[in-house]
Image (tube, rainbow, N blue to C red):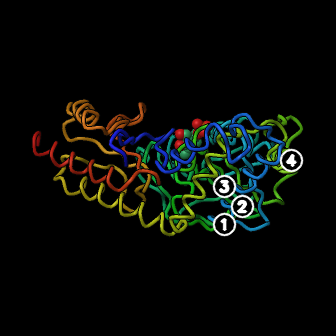
Amino acid sequence: QSQDRIFNFAAGPATLPENVLKKAESELYIWRGSGMSVMEMSHRGKDFLSIIQKAESDLRTLLNISSDYAVLFLQGGATSQFAAIPLNLCKPDDTVDYMVTGSWSDKAFKEAQKYCKPNVIWSGKSEKYTNIPPFDALEQNPAAKYLHICANETIHGVEFKNYPTPENNDGILIADMSSNFCSKPVDVSKFGIIYAGAQKNVGPSGVTIVIIRKDLIGNAQGITPVMLDYKIHAENNSLYNTPPCYGIYMCGLVFEDLLEQGGLPEIEKKNMKKAEILYNTIDGSNGFYRCPVDKSVRSLMNVPFTLEKPDLEAEFIKKAAEEKMVQLKGHRSVGGIRASIYNAMPLAGVEKLVAFMKDFQARHG
Ligand code: PLP
């Protein structure tokens, strides 16, 4: 990447591919002969329609999404989906199952309590969210309307490597994929709903992507705000009200870039390589660095670790920033260090980080 860009290990909003930013810059004032910026266009005009349709179609290609599913570009962040899901799929007395593998699935569970009767069927809290249980140990409720998981816990660095089979009535599995969306191939047909805030892997904040099986649309509770009703958004192709136009355009550029790189199998290979060198450095440090997460469920996207001598952590973060590696502080709720290495983090960024880590250990170990 260019000399004047730093390596940004933030969990989100996160680094974007440099070539995507340059492309956006080149058409910032005038989008392809339209005489105006995407930011200035009518969301109902033919230019913007071509942008949103191309974004949807490229995402469908990337994830191999069938016509049984609607793809929605919404606002309100993944956080709004914590409420939208129970509001659209449940009546107030319906039960639903949640696996709580970290802070984000816990938040989703807590929000659902307002709109239906969720059960926590497994919680990793007592183990400080460092594991995911074997799926046959789960006690699912057969009457549950759905089973909700967070596919990648951004704060705790815990990622599902495969998915539980829902035993509820209609076999509905729902996943918050905010922090590993489009980081690897996913069999969408296993899910009722996949949702993700864009601001980690696929674009700027302000866009929330919902991929929903069409037969789940249309049963929202009467109190559901219009902005959270999937039926309204699906019937209007995400154009019921003014959508986050520029953000959708940016997501479209990212999808194009992911396809040009060879699609998600290629992206996954790159992500595995980056994660491997970072975890190997942590595990090979004789305890100087330590990642608490069970090896079988370590995230390819968010790598949390601590230093054996916690009082060195501030120095680590400061020195890294001096070497143009920023946003390495762990989430305020857990402390320590966290390196988020989403799709757009170049291998060179991770190589630079591990070289720094080895050097820091040599100086302080
Ligand atoms: N879910 C996960 C896994 C997240 O990482 C985040 C944000 O960091 C959220 C949900 C909340 O997303 P938003 O800020 O888009 O509402």
The residue indicated by pointer 1 is 61
Can you tell which quarter of the image residue 325 is in? top left
Quadrant (top left, top right, bottom left, bottom right) of the C terminus:
top left
User: Residue 236, which numbered label?
Assistant: 4
The residue indicated by pointer 2 is 57
**Circle 4: element type:** loop
Q: Earlier in the sequence, mark 1 or mark 3?
A: 1
Q: Position of residue 97 (x, y in %)?
A: 66, 52
Q: Are marks 2 and 4 in contact (CB under 8 Å)?
A: no
Relative vertical location of residue 258 with respect to residue 47 in this rendering, above or below: below
- Residue at coordinates 36% horizontally, 63% vertically from top-left? 273
Q: Are marks 1 and 3 in contact (CB under 8 Å)?
A: no
User: Residue 135, which numbered label?
Assistant: none
Q: Are marks 1 and 2 in contact (CB under 8 Å)?
A: yes
User: What crowding class fits label 4: few (fewer than 14 Cα within 10 Å), some (14-19), or many (20 or more)?
Assistant: few
Q: Position of residue 215 (x, y in %)?
A: 84, 60
Relative vertical location of residue 216 with respect to residue 248 in this rendering, above or below: below
**Circle 2: element type:** helix
- Residue at coordinates 43% horizontally, 59% vertically from top-left? 297
Q: Which three-letter amino acid code belongs to the residue tagged 1? A: Thr
